[in-house]
Image (tube, helix red, strand yellow):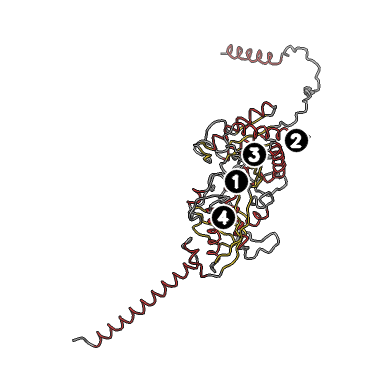
Amino acid sequence: MISTLQKSIFFAMLVASVVMAAFLIRLRNRAEDRLQAQGAAAPAALGESAGNPTRVVTLYVPNDLDDSLTTVERNIPLPVDENAQARVLLENLMEAYRAPGSTHPMNVATGVNDVYFLAAPQGKGQDGTGDGEQMAVVDLNGALAVAQPSGIEPETLTLLSMMVTLHANLPRVTQVHFLVDGQPRETLAGHADLTRTYLAADAERQPGPSGAGGAGR
Amino acid sequence: MRWIEAVALGVAWLAGWAQQTPQPQLPRAPAVPSIPAPVAPVPFQPPRFVVVLDAAHGGSDTGARIGGGILEKDITLGLSARLRSTLHAHGIEVVTTRQADMDLLPVSRAETANRAQGAACLVIHATATGSGVHLFTSSLSATGNARFLAWQTAQSAYVTQSLKLESEIDSALAHAEIPVSLGRASVEPMDSMTCPEVAVEMAPLVGGHVTEARPVTDAGYQKSVVDAVTAALEQWRSDWKQ
């Protein structure tokens, strides 16, 4: 014979289990939504973000033969989250590197692990309107460093194209720092310095045949 | 014991007499006021015109793979030796950071260049990408001369001169019909050098309307680049003397 007390305890536990299950399912769905928003699974994320509103973005694609950056406009779906936007922009740039007949050929499947934003140190711009300026910390994939052709010109062009593309589409990004697989590294592939923080705005303004020939310290 | 006292007194008296006796003095020359020895006039020494050549990479740092198993470190060393000989033949003094396949820290390279007080410093690189010769100057912003320069940004005081030197080399290479591209870059040890400096990166020649395709290892192509750079440095020397 089951006592009333035991029945009550059983039903109370049953209800608690159902509530907990519902809560866990809700948490799981929210985590999934967040990951999708951050585009955590690029290049698959490029397809997943197809539901996002499309926007015309400008990519700066290097040309090794004349040391220049060529602008390419694309209409692509961009996630709402800024970190995910930066990541999608850079992945599209890598796609341009990989494309047949590329002017900056590089055979790399995924070039960027993630992009983080920090408040830019000494963020006041030259015009004194430095409020909200950001430093993008671009965590490159080790595969990109391996695939990167070695030399001052090709390495500098890779960094410049990423910096200028980020600054052109996300103007608050004024400084860029690069990591490789989450770690600081001396050079990209033996030449271009990765220990420093680059000024993206200066990179865009640099004179020279490329119109974007360098970056300030 | 009186005789002992008498002897002691006698000895003491003799000792006192010997001290008081004037010593014979040699005639002395009259005192002459000291005059500093005449200094031979030093002919005006114009500052030396020294070119510093830094063959990039070396030892375990192989640099780029140019193709066919050829390493950048070997090409830069060969170019440096070739350029050194040609510059010597034109009466230009040369200091090199390395003359063998050895590991060398960027700091040591900059130290050698700064100690030599080079009138021009060339950092020699090679790559398999692009076409022609890529000239790079430091990406630092130009600043005025200061009494003390920070090691990391010492080149900033020389950026204006470096750009002039780059322009000189650009003209000479263009005259030799070698495609040139100019840029700014952040590459060790350029930012720490206290001299007008340019990184000269030699890339293969891509065939075109005017140019014939040639690899970086082509002796004729290398000679054209070395001759053009020598001509530029000769011009730089005559500008520098004025």
- What residue is pinned by disc 2? B240
Q: Chain of mark 2?
A: B
- What residue is pinned by disc 1? A153
Question: Which callout, 4 or 1, points at the residue further toward the start of the chain?
Answer: 1
Q: CA distance from mark 2 to mark 1?
A: 29 Å
| Residue lying at the far left of the rendered structure | A1
Residue B107 vs residue B49: left or right? left
| Amino acid type, residue under disc 2 in the picture | Trp
Q: CA distance from mark 4 to mark 2?
A: 39 Å
- What residue is pinned by disc 4? A177
Judged by depth in the image, the label closer to the viewer, 3 or 1, is 3
Q: Is residue B139 above or below residue B97?
A: below
Tell if the residue under mark 3 belongs to the same chain as the one under mark 1. Answer: no
| Image location (x, y in percent) of residue A12 | 31, 83
Nearest the viewer among B202 and B42 is: B202
Mark 2 residue element: helix
Judged by depth in the image, the label closer to the viewer, 2 or 1, is 1
The quarter of the picture where residue A138 lies is: bottom right
Question: Which callout, 3 or 2, points at the residue further toward the start of the chain?
Answer: 3
Give the numbered dot on residue B211. Answer: 3
Q: CA distance from mark 3 to mark 4?
A: 39 Å
Tell if the residue under mark 3 belongs to the same chain as the one under mark 2. Answer: yes
Tell if the residue under mark 4 belongs to the same chain as the one under mark 2. Answer: no
| Image location (x, y in percent) of residue B9 | 63, 15
Mark 1 residue element: helix
